[in-house]
Every structure is written in C-alpha cells, then in structure tokens.
Amino acid sequence: MHQIRIASVVLSAVLLASCGGGASDVPAKPSFASQVSFGDSLSDVGSYNVGAIAALGGGQFTINIPGTPTNWTEMTAPMLGLSQPCAAQTGIDNGSGAAPGTPVGMVVPVTNNTACTAYAQGGARVTSQPGIGNKLLGGGGFALTVPVVTQIANHLAANGGTFNGNEIVFVMAGANDVFYQAGLVGAAAITSAQAAAAMQTAATELATAVKNEIVGKGAKYVVVVNIPDMGTTPYVAVQASPAATKALLDALVSAFNTQLAADLPDSATVLNIDANTASHDEVTNPSKYNLTNVTGTACNLSFGVNPLSPSAGVPGSSLVCKASNLTAGVSVTDHYMFADLVHPTPYAHSLFALYVLQAMTNKGWY
C-alpha cells in the first residue's frame, strides 16, 4: 500500500540514523514474541467484522480495503516481525434478539478467539459500560464495547493470569469516555467541571490498570497512548451541539491526558506516546506529512450511501466505509486525514504507526 511504503522508507532512514553506524555500545533491542493491544475503535482490527457489517464490506473504523493493513496496530506488527493481529472477540448485538423482525445479521453471538490478542473494541470506555454505540444507550447501537480494564482481565484469564514479558503491549483509550461525558453535559445531566473530574478518574483508573494488571503481571514493554486532539476533528464542525464544542472536548481531553501523564510517567517498562501533540501538528501543518485534506471526510457518510446513517442529516460511520462509498472524487490512496468525523484513514494510521515505531526506537525497543 502506497502509504505504508512511505512510512517504511522514512522509518528506515530514522533507524539508520539512530543506530550510530553499528556502534558496539548500542544495547540489544528486544525481540517480541507477540503483540497485545487494548483499547477502542482507534485500535480495533475487526471486533464487529461479522454478520451484516462483514456483508457490507466493513469491519474496521477507517477505509476498509480487503487484504490490506488499514489500522496502525496492523502496520506495526509486520515491522516488529510479527503476524497480523486478529480480534480476540467478535460479535454484534442491537438488542433485538430473537424477536420477530430482527434485522438480518445484526445479532451475532460473541465468539472468543483464543489465538488472537487484539482486544480493542470500537466504543469501549476505560472501565464502564455502556460504551459508545452499545445497545444500552439506545439509538440502535450494536457494539459490544467491552471496557479496557475488562479486556485486560480477559487476556489474563486466557493466559494463566500473567504476561510473559516478551510481548509488546499497546494501550490506547479514553476518547469514548470523552464522548460519554460530553453527552451528559450536552443533556444538562452534569456540569463541565463534573465531566472533567470524571475524565481524571478514568485516567487514574487506566494508569492503575497498566501498573497493576499489565506491568504488575509481568509485561516489560508497554506502550500507552493518550487521547488525540479531538477538538480539530470534523466532528466539531458537523455536530453542532453543546456536547460537541471544541472548548468542551479540549477541556475533557486535557483533563484525561494531564492526569494520565501524572499517574503513569515513563519508566523502564512504560513508554508514553503523545498522540495529542502528533495529531494536532498534522492538522496544523498538513504539508509536512503529505496530507492533502485535514478537514473533510474521505468516506461519504450521508443517508442512502453509508448504510449506518439512520436518516437524512445523521452521519454514518467509517465502519462500513470502502472504495465504493467514498466522497466523490476521493480514492483509497488519497492522503485524507479523516475517514469519518473522528477516525483516521489508512494513510493517517500509517503516520501514527511510524510515530509509535520512532518512539520505540528512541526507547531502544525497536
């Protein structure tokens, strides 16, 4: 894929520069036996790639391109010498069950795939249900949204209660807590100050889980990613509501990221990745990253085109976005930043994969 080749070339140059010409004092880099990932839609490699979603050619929250890595965790794996990640759990449930009129393919039983270690699920929050897109929130949602702390517990349960110490572990969460708390503010159920406090609590809970349930259970290489810059996404421009103002989103993201940095500093076993700064710089300086559009969406999200748009004026989702339902004039190889209102395109994912691998290189992990 064009964007992956670009990242590979740049990364090779970075690695040559960092190796110091083979100097003998460069420490040996770890050789990873597996990649384990926890989080939300930004790391989801196919939790909902079943039933009606699979039939529509979707399955990931980006532009879905068959046979091609489109998520950043799919891009890091081969560069670390590992096989492509697969979803540890799949299924969808819109709550209609076996009732008459159940939409075909919108209720698919949960399957736990014991050979897979990509636990991230679209809509997942740090510790709580319901997540974004879960049936319990109403609106026809079907996402499983297993919380990140439960994802970690599920991995431990399937692996004797421990990490081996030879995994690279990726953790990226918090954005859905922002959407959830912002929604409560928009509904006048809580104040913005209460929402910010809830985000701080979520950050502390994530940091505690990393320290106690990941590092504390044997993991030696843990990459923790903060929340990207949600205030510069197309979501702010399109969703004109009290729950989607830039000021509110910025405040909630900042509350989480600041608390996470305080509770979980870099250490011998933890590497923090500042996705917020990276994504903000991409929007502010797009030419530096060969980005051609940082304001629009590569996917056509309109009713009648995107199958997940329920009605006119209500945007759909990149979960079912593919080459045949892109915005007019856009191709899968164009360098748009956003697939939908908040999710990256495969090209933007490749930029982030590069960013992570560069940070790992600086840490001596790659």
Image (cartoon, rainbow, N blue to C red):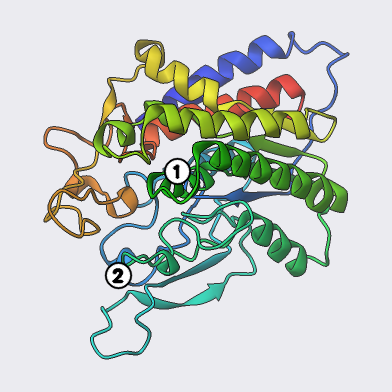
Tag on residue 52? 2
Relative placement, left or right, of 293 versus 366 is left
Please determine whether, in this image, residue 299 is positioned above or below residue 36. above
Distance from label 2 to label 1 (Cα)?
30 Å
Q: Could you say whether the residue bearing mark 2 is in a helix, strand or loop?
A: helix
Residue 98 higher or lower than 21, as above or below: below
Residue drawn at 71 percent across, 47 percent down: 205
Question: Which mark's residue is nearer the viewer, 2 or 1?
Answer: 1
* Residue 44 horizontal side relative to residue 38, left or right: left
User: 125 or 6: nearer the eye?
Assistant: 125
343 or 17, which lies in front?
343
Q: Which residue occupies 27% across, 49% down?
A: 321
| Residue 355 spot, x, y in % from top left | 56, 25
Tell me what residue is drawn at x 30 percent, y 70 percent.
Answer: 52
Picture coordinates of residue 130, whole percent (x, y) = 51, 62
Secondary structure of residue under mark 1:
helix
Decide which of tag 2 and tag 1 comes sooner along the chain.
2
The amino acid type, in three-letter code, at marker 2 is Ala
Residue 27 is situated, as x and y percent measured from the top left of the image, at 85, 22
Q: Which amino acid does label 1 sit on?
A: Ala
Disc 1 marks which residue?
182
Query: Dividing the picture into quarters, in which one does residue 118 lie?
Result: bottom right
